[in-house]
Image (spheres, rainbow, N blue to C red):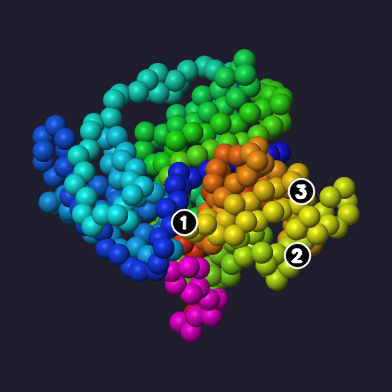
Amino acid sequence: MISRIGLLCFLILPLFCVSQTLTGRIIDKATQQPIETVAVYFDNTTIGTTTNEKGEFSITYTDATQSTLVISYLGYEKVFILDYRSKKTLNIELVEAENTLDEVYLDYDDGLTRRQKLRLFRKEFLGSSKFGKSCKILNEDDLFLRYDKKNKTMSASSKAPVMVINKALQYEVAFDIKDFEIKFRYVEPETNIFNIHSIAYFGTSFYKDLKDAKKTKTLKNREAAYNGSVQHFMRALYNKNFEEEGYIFGKNKFKVNWNDFFTIYDTDNLGYKTVVLKEKLDIFYNQDKGSVIETAVDQFQVDQYGNYLPVVAVYFGGVMGTQRIGDLLPSDYGLNEKETTKNPED
């Protein structure tokens, strides 16, 4: 099964390393009144804040922060800001969102019961690993789930960010779905047989540490989730240190040299490396985690933090292809602070 998991990351890399503080004010465009508790965060990171009663916010970031700045408030159109590095202050006017027709489909008989659709969504959104199984969605009533019998696809949307508690990794994750689709090869509702062809979902996310985030067990779980992940692999790709990081490659059941398949060009003036993958390739982490990588484009870009573009054109199968929200770490994992499994307070 091939999986595409995407976040709305548009990367803008600085030419030098400095910490910067961005301030701003957010108001309602129609009333010109400030809006309190607007979420302001860098996509797929732990870096975020909310506006005060005056609609004001302040947020600090470094060059390890590469994601889009997201302005989000329920009932309003989201704002995505890419060029925040060229600004010190932002004045944002939020526009009320148009009503959608999703509510019409809430109880619509589309061939699957809501219970069946929820079960499928939980499994394919959270994942079936031990980390995925430790997750719980707090606001399932906000989900709109639809099944298209003709095309054998199931889609999902939500009127609010999907709130997930990841007990094993000690994160609260707010995931704002932009698109979610499961394509089936075969569906037999009466016997609950669902043969899945592919999964694709995209959106923005914000991570918060829970109270036990610094405990030794949590740090070990996070390290286990990171090792052998797409994020880990992409950082190793950028640094060309596959062997040191525990990766080997195969083709037709034979071990191969990675540089016979990857061409990696030097970093450009924006901090990207351009990667060309010659053909589909098997990946093994520590010899026992088999994955597959292939692309739908001639080349893609990767940065030192493991971010890559275009996410929709790089496909992973096997272990990496089964990683879901429950297995994922924020893009600033291990970068802003040195994470360690040693904690004298435990």
- Quadrant of the drawing holding the N terminus: top right
User: What secondary structure is the magenta-colored segment mainly?
Assistant: loop
Counting from the top left corner in percent of width and height, residue 89 is at: 21, 54
Q: Nearer the viewer, mark 3 or mark 2?
A: 3
For the residues labelled 3 and 1, the Cα–Cα distance comes to 28 Å
Q: What residue type is disc 3 on?
A: Leu
Counting from the top left corner in percent of width and height, residue 180 is at: 52, 34
**Residue 181 drawn in magenta:** no
Task: Name the residue tied to disc 2.
Answer: 286
Q: Nearer the viewer, mark 1 or mark 2?
A: 1
Asked if the residue under mark 2 is in contact with the one under mark 3, i.e. CB atoms within 8 Å, the reply is no
Q: Is residue 333 above or below residue 99?
A: below
Q: Is residue 277 left or right of residue 76?
A: right
Task: Name the residue tied to disc 3.
Answer: 281
Q: What residue type is disc 2 on?
A: Asn
Q: Is residue 223 above or below residue 342?
A: above
**Is residue 112 something that shows in the picture?**
yes
Q: Is residue 81 above or below residue 75?
A: below
